[in-house]
Amino acid sequence: MSAPRGWSTTTCGQCGELRPCHRKILEQRVCQRCMLRFRRTAKPCPGCGQLKVLAFYDPQRRPACAGCTGHEPVYACPSCGREDSPFGRHCGPCTLRQQLTELLTDPTGDIHPKLQPVFDALMAGPRPQTTLYWLTRASARPDILRDMARGELEISHAAFAALPATRSVDYVRDLLAALGVLPPYQLAVERIVPWLRELLTDLPKPHAEVIDRFARWQLLRRLRLLGERDRVTRGGVQHARAAVLGAARFLRWLDEHNATLATATQAQLDDYLVSHPGRGRSLKVFLDWTQRSGVGSDLHVPGAERPLPQVTLSDQRRWQQVERLLHDDDIRLYVRIGGLFMLLFAQPLARICRMRADQITTEPDGAVTVTFDAAPIQLPDPLDRLVLDQLARRGQASYASRPDRWLFPGGLPGKHLVTENIRSQLVALGIRPSAARKAAMFDLAARMPVPILAELLGLSTNTATRWAALAARDWSQYAAMRRA
Ligand SMILES: [Zn+2]
Ligand SMILES: [Zn+2]
Ligand SMILES: [Zn+2]
């Protein structure tokens, strides 16, 4: 390799070491390493006001850019001329543009039209270097995008379903769904499909057929509808799986007792439920469906009387927890707010996690309100300030999930925080979400008429009534005690 022009070993003007120095910065010879470091420190030039590498003196002996001092623009990107985002021989944006173009080009030589939103979103990220780093990691699976652009892999959920289910694959899939390239989907719901396929292969054919229909037309259909409104919970997915297993077990039991869905009697079902306690709930969905769809006879799982809710958290303990979340700066901000929404307004964590930023409003007089359901509630000080802080901090989420609408953005692009994240941190603080929420509900129910409670908290009137009944019962007992 021939030495570059101006090559000479001398003492570097920046680090003081004896090295080959072939460029001058502020009239001092510097080594390659110091030059590379210096070129990442663009500042506003006193001559032109632009962000430039100030490696030269102007006539007033101020550090200034090459253009303003009549020097070769050695720090400028050869494509676009900018000096403030160096990356390799070009700048970050030009390198990213070139690499994304290469990645997303279809066989005609243009960016695949369906993948144009991916190009636009990744180009718009605040730090091209971060995206460039992602593109260099094979384990991050950018090759999926290339194969899709070239037509070697279909741009569909089915294509993703056939790939190994890793975090990286899910990330690319989530990215495409968040950008509208793929329709919205719920990972937990779609994972039921391969699980179901496997389970059905082990069942007798007639059983497999009826359960397949039940799963597709009842369970998955309902979950996907909920998914479109982003209302799928982990419990809902587990319940669907339990319903499939419950149906399979019941059909096997019927086989063993020489019966079928069409011939089974209510007495047989009662026998089954007595000899298998706890199976009624998961079986009920299946039997309701077989009845509606005409597959089975008229079988009825007796519904258990819904007991009144239990409250196990004392009021004093609850206010201690509120106090701590309001004032302890060592707890993560979103955990404090999530916990407070639960302890003060009885909101379930799953619903808190999918709150949108536009549910928070600042009124002209400075009051901050939150709308959980229909009516806004004014936030007390200092909770209002915590919430405004959270709104301001959201912008620091990872690049791909930036332009989104969630109050608590999650780690995945376009997704909100997962419930488990807040839940585990609250439990670590000694706050048990279900007890905390029930205590809040109890307190509110004692203070508010049912319709207002239902409207403020987004409860069904039935639920609000059950809580009001509990609060009233305790209140009347308390009143009776006082009179005695
Ligand atoms: Zn040096
Ligand atoms: Zn300048
Ligand atoms: Zn450039």
Image: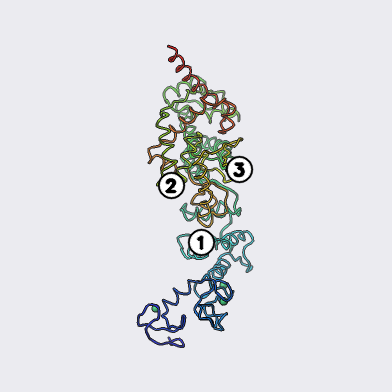
Mark 3 and mark 2: span between their CA atoms? Answer: 28 Å
Q: Does the Cβ of the disc 1 residue fall within 8 Å of ligand 3?
A: no
The label number, if any, that marks residue 332 in the structure image: 2
Q: Residue at horizontal 40%, vertical 30%? A: 316
The label number, if any, that marks residue 254 in the structure image: none
Mark 3 and mark 1: span between their CA atoms? Answer: 49 Å
Mark 3 residue element:
loop
Check disc 3: other Cα within 10 Å, few if <14, some if 14-19, many if 20+: few
Q: Amino acid at mark 3?
A: Asp
Q: Which-is-in-front pick, marks 3 and 1? A: 3
Q: Is residue 392 above or below residue 350?
A: below
Mark positioned earlier in the residue sequence (3 or 1): 1
Q: Viewer-proximal residue, 181 or 383?
A: 383
| Residue located beneath label 1 in the image | 142
Residue 245 place in picture, x, y as percent = 47, 35
Q: Viewer-proximal residue, 466 or 439?
A: 439
Mark 1 residue element:
loop
Proximity of marks 3 and 1: CB atoms separated by less than 8 Å? no
